[in-house]
């Protein structure tokens, strides 16, 4: 096993798996697929894995210089983001004749998670969210160092707030990701952040099996509750979110534990290196490819074409980002 401060390919693999889950969730939207809503919910749990890993990796570090940490995060998150929205702006303006300067200004300021996105940038609400979580990280850090704060109590308070906000008006992130979902994201990030040092390496298969049993029971209960309460605020904003969070954590632990270090290391390193860019670009490619390929050549050609072109564009954006960061020093 590698030290947490060195390269941990098991974590990288979990991130790559989460990336593909999110992409598949969006790729199946235009496809007529049996049980599509169930597949969509399953693949959507990838976003919770991303949030958990972000919190876990931030919590494993002793951050002494917050200014330096924020500059590093802004450069890593925002530069590829601005490159991608420039491409999306060009595509939507030229090909879709969609020009709303106010909305593009919102996009440039990374406020799309609050005020809405354009057609090719729908998933980019996540960029707003992750930057908000990074802004909250010093608070998490102080709470973690101060032993007066018990995370179990904090977790209980967050879940209580989630239930309360589930019955309030939809204020906050767009597309149903309201205040209740924000609390879920803060909780998921916090679970990762407050995790003990190297805890992923200390968790054995017996513990994961116990977590899996709890998760399966929770998912079973979710299916039953859905039959009686589907469409209610309690189901949509509490039960569905929390069950997907549990499923995501369970999947992340299994993928982490079954991986043997140094297997397929070059492929994992490369895919993990462009995973964020892959997320940023995939919706644009889905929009462009759906009408050209899916309708004319079928589902398989659509899926393969989308993945290949997205990987290529993600690699190009990654190289541009590296070049710009080199110039910025």
Image (cartoon, rainbow, N blue to C red):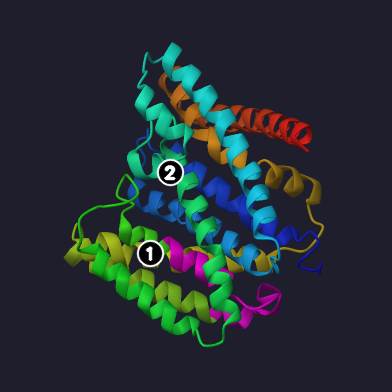
Asked whether 54 or 263 is in front, the reply is 54
Q: Residue at coordinates 69% horizontally, 47% vertically from top-left?
A: 272
Q: Are marks 1 and 2 in contact (CB under 8 Å)?
A: no
Q: CA distance from mark 1 to mark 2?
A: 15 Å
Question: Magenta span covers which residues?
Answer: 185-209
Q: Residue at x 47, y 78 (%)?
A: 213
Which residue corresponds to the image point at 47% horizontal and 22% vertical from the top-left?
89
Residue 303 placement, left or right of 223? right
Let me know if residue 200 is in the magenta part: yes
Q: Quadrant of the C terminus?
A: top right
Residue 65 location in percent, x, y? 70, 61
* Residue 293 visible: no
Mostly what secondary structure, the magenta segment? helix
Tell me, yes or no, whether the highlighted magenta stretch contains residue 54: no
Residue at (36% x, 46% y) in the render:
36
Dividing the picture into quadrants, the one containing residue 214 is bottom left
Could you tell me residue 67's position as x and y percent?
65, 55
Tell which of 120 and 289 is nearer to you: 120
Front-most of residues 317 and 20: 317
Farthest residue, direction bottom: 148
Residue 206 pos. (x, y %): 61, 83
Q: Which residue is mark 1?
A: 183
Quadrant of the rendered structure where residue 277 is? top right
Quadrant in the picture for the N terminus = bottom right
Vertical placement of residue 141 versus 43, above or below? below
Residue under pointer 2: 125
Callout 2: helix, strand or loop? helix
User: On screen, 78 above or below 84?
Assistant: below
């Amino acid at each position: 096993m590698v030290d947490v401060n060195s390269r941990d390919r098991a974590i990288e693999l979990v991130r790559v798996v989460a990336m593909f889950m999110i992409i598949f969730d969006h790729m199946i939207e235009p496809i007529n697929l049996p049980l599509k809503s169930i597949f969509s919910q399953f693949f959507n749990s990838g976003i919770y894995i991303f949030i958990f890993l972000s919190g876990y990796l931030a919590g494993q570090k002793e951050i002494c210089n917050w200014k330096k940490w924020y500059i590093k995060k802004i450069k890593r998150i925002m530069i590829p983001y601005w490159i991608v929205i420039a491409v999306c702006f060009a595509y939507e303006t030229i090909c879709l004749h969609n020009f709303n300067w106010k909305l593009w200004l919102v996009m440039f300021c990374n406020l799309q998670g609050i005020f809405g996105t354009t057609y090719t940038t729908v998933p980019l609400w996540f960029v707003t969210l992750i930057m908000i979580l990074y802004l909250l990280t010093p608070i998490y850090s102080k709470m973690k160092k101060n032993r007066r704060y018990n995370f179990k109590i904090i977790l209980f308070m967050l879940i209580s707030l989630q239930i309360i906000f589930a019955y309030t008006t939809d204020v906050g992130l767009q597309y149903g990701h309201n205040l209740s979902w924000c609390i879920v994201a803060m909780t998921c990030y916090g679970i990762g952040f407050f995790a003990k040092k190297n805890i992923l390496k200390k968790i054995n298969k017996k513990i994961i099996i116990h977590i899996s049993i709890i998760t399966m029971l929770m998912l079973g209960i979710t299916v039953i509750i859905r039959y009686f309460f589907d469409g209610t605020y309690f189901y949509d904003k509490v039960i569905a979110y929390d069950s997907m969070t549990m499923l995501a954590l369970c999947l992340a632990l299994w993928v982490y534990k079954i991986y043997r270090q140094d297997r397929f290391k070059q492929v994992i390193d490369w895919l993990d290196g462009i995973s964020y860019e892959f997320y940023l670009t995939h919706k644009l490619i889905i929009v462009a490819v759906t009408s050209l390929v899916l309708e004319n050549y079928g589902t398989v050609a659509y899926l393969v074409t989308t993945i290949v072109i997205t990987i290529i564009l993600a690699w190009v954006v990654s190289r541009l980002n590296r070049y710009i960061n080199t110039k910025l020093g």
